[in-house]
Amino acid sequence: MEIDLTQIRPDRHHVERVYEASAFGERGQPHFRVKDPVRVSLEIAKDEDRYRVQGRATTALEVECSRCLEPFPAPIDASFDLRYLPQGDARGDDVEIADEDLSTAFYHADRLDLGQLLEEQFYLALPMKPLCREDCAGLCSECGANLNVRACGCTRTWQDPRLLGLRGLLDAGKHRP
Ligand SMILES: [Zn+2]
Ligand SMILES: [Zn+2]
């Protein structure tokens, strides 16, 4: 999953590729697993030894719900705009950091690691706390049952602190003369 930069023409160069999910292997673990073929479309602009890579990648990832811990499919449509410098190039530290706020990455041996690029973009495209659905009920804090699947009958001691605060206000109101 690499792009041979020696094949990139000096003008804009368009790349369209489709990768089977299996091509990603363990990439993304433990945060996600690539489930669907990945469609990538890239515009690569060359400026001497620097490259600007603008593109879009779509696929579906399998991620774990942060609340009930069940895997679920998350559709991904990631757009990116990156600047690639040769590895070990100090210019990445200081030059044109303000330049359109591009993210800077590095290539080496005239090859751009598209697998790594996609892995990073997928990671960025995922929410910090993925939820299988907005109202995921999560796991029972007593017995660990998935409350989306069944009610377990436990008496759960945990209560939403916001509701406790509200109840306090209501109780205070009741005792008012
Ligand atoms: Zn869930
Ligand atoms: Zn329970």
Image: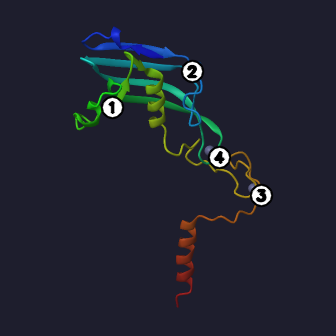
Looking at the picture, which amino acid does disc 4 mark?
Cys
Question: Which residue does the numbered mark 3 point to in the structure image?
Answer: 153
Label 1: which secondary element: strand
Q: What numbered label is drawn on residue 104?
A: 1
Tell me which numbered mark, 2 or 1, is placed earlier along the sequence: 2
When the figure is inspected, residue 135 is found, relative to residue 49, above or below; the finding is below
Q: What numbered label is drawn on residue 168?
A: none
Is ligand 2 closer than 8 angstroms to the Cβ of mark 3? Answer: yes
| Label 4 CA crowd tier, 10 Å (few <14, some 14–19, many 20+) | some
Q: What numbered label is drawn on residue 21?
A: 2
Tell me which numbered mark, 3 or 1, is placed earlier along the sequence: 1
| Label 1 CA crowd tier, 10 Å (few <14, some 14–19, many 20+) | some
Question: Which residue does the numbered mark 4 point to in the structure image?
Answer: 68
Please tell me which residue lies in front, 13 or 58.
13
Which residue is depicted at the point 63% across and 37% down? 71
Identify the coloring: rainbow
Label 4: which secondary element: loop
Quadrant of residue 54 in the image?
Answer: top left
Label 3: which secondary element: loop
Tell me which numbered mark, 1 or 4, is placed earlier along the sequence: 4
Tell me which numbered mark, 2 or 3, is placed earlier along the sequence: 2
| Label 3 CA crowd tier, 10 Å (few <14, some 14–19, many 20+) | few
The CA distance from mark 2 to mark 3 is 41 Å
Looking at the picture, which amino acid does disc 3 mark?
Gly
Are the residues flagged by discs 3 and 4 in contact, CB closer than 8 Å? no
Q: Which mark lies nearer to you, 1 or 4?
A: 1
Image position, residue 24 (x, y; %): 55, 22
Q: Which mark lies nearer to you, 2 or 1?
A: 1
Looking at the picture, which amino acid does disc 1 mark?
Thr
Are the residues flagged by discs 2 and 1 in contact, CB closer than 8 Å? no
Looking at the picture, which amino acid does disc 2 mark?
Ala
Is ligand 1 closer than 8 angstroms to the Cβ of mark 4? Answer: yes
